[in-house]
Image (cartoon, helix red, strand yellow):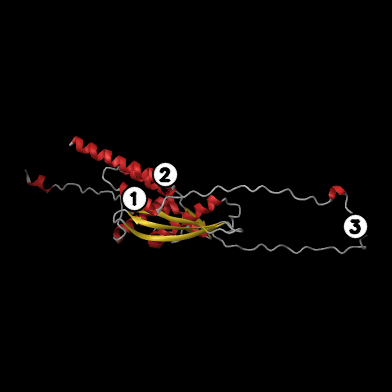
Amino acid sequence: MSEATKNIKEPVRKTKVESFDISRSDETLHLATDLAKFIKDNKLSTTVQGKEFVNVEGWQYAGSRLGIVPIVDHVINVSTEQEIKYQAKVTLFDMKSGHTVGAGFAICSNKEQGKKFYQEFAIMSMAQTRAIGKAYRNILAWIIRAAGYEPTPAEEMEYGGNTPTVQPAMTVAPAATPAPAAAEAPAAMKAVPAEPVAVVAETPAPSYASASQKEEIIRLLNHPVITRPEKTKMLLNINRLDEERATQAIAKLKKAIDDRENGQSAAA
């Protein structure tokens, strides 16, 4: 081999970073650049008083690039006769280490400004959404700030408090002459007893999968025989599972793992 051939350097191939490590500042700064582009391209921010706040989907994207997924621990109904109100708790699970790395609490009420006519399921859902954003905010706020956005989830900015509406005082015109005694109202205008109102039973809120069920699903998804598309699809829907569907998902995953392991053993 000639000297000229020896001196030719092979081009350096740059590998595309598919995931980042939150403990490495150089990687997370690259994530901030990637995150800023993703939020802008997909319009995942909301402008409030001239400032840009990232929607929960943007926070979830940042978490997914770090291998951190949200798990809804519980949703508690704390409603009263005058108010529909739910409290949610979300923990963050690091798929690399297998440990919980953060948590967030949030509430939602139909007493909030703009939510007077929200149905119960929408109040419960918003409590979960806010808790997801809050959990990510507790550990990723500086990355969102580095991406050029406000470090508070947009869903938290929706709460405007309960500002009472002041009704204008009514002006009563003075009577010109004393009114004569009112005659007895005709029979047709007399008060009629109100018909009893039928009470419609409310549909009970679904019982969502427990934290232990979700952790078992994530543990099974990390098995080598489970494909990346299967894992992604399941993780995107894990917080929508009720207890029955979560039990079915666990059974299906165990069966798939068992079948694929036995198939590999037979092929070997």
In the rendered structure, find residue 182 and report the number of the disc placed on it: 3
Q: Label for residue 245? A: 2
| Pointers 2 and 1 in contact (C-beta within 8 Å) | no
Asked if residue 233 shows in the view, the reply is no
Quarter holding the N terminus is top left
Crowd class of label 2 (few under 14; some 14 to 19; many from 20; radius 10 Å) = some
Q: Position of residue 236 (x, y in %)?
A: 40, 47
Mark 1 Cα within 10 Å, few/some/many (few <14, many 20+)?
A: few
- Quadrant of the frame with the C terminus: top left
User: Can you give x and y, in whole percent of width and height, for residue 213 in the image?
Assistant: 37, 50
Q: Nearer the viewer, mark 2 or mark 3?
A: 2
- Mark positioned earlier in the residue sequence (2 or 3): 3
- 256 shown above or below 62: above
Q: Residue at x 20, y 38 (%)?
A: 265
Q: Label 3: few (<14), some or many (≥20) within 10 Å?
A: few
Going by the numbered disc 2, the residue's amino acid type is: Arg
Q: In this view of the protein, which residue sits in the foreground, 70 or 74?
A: 74
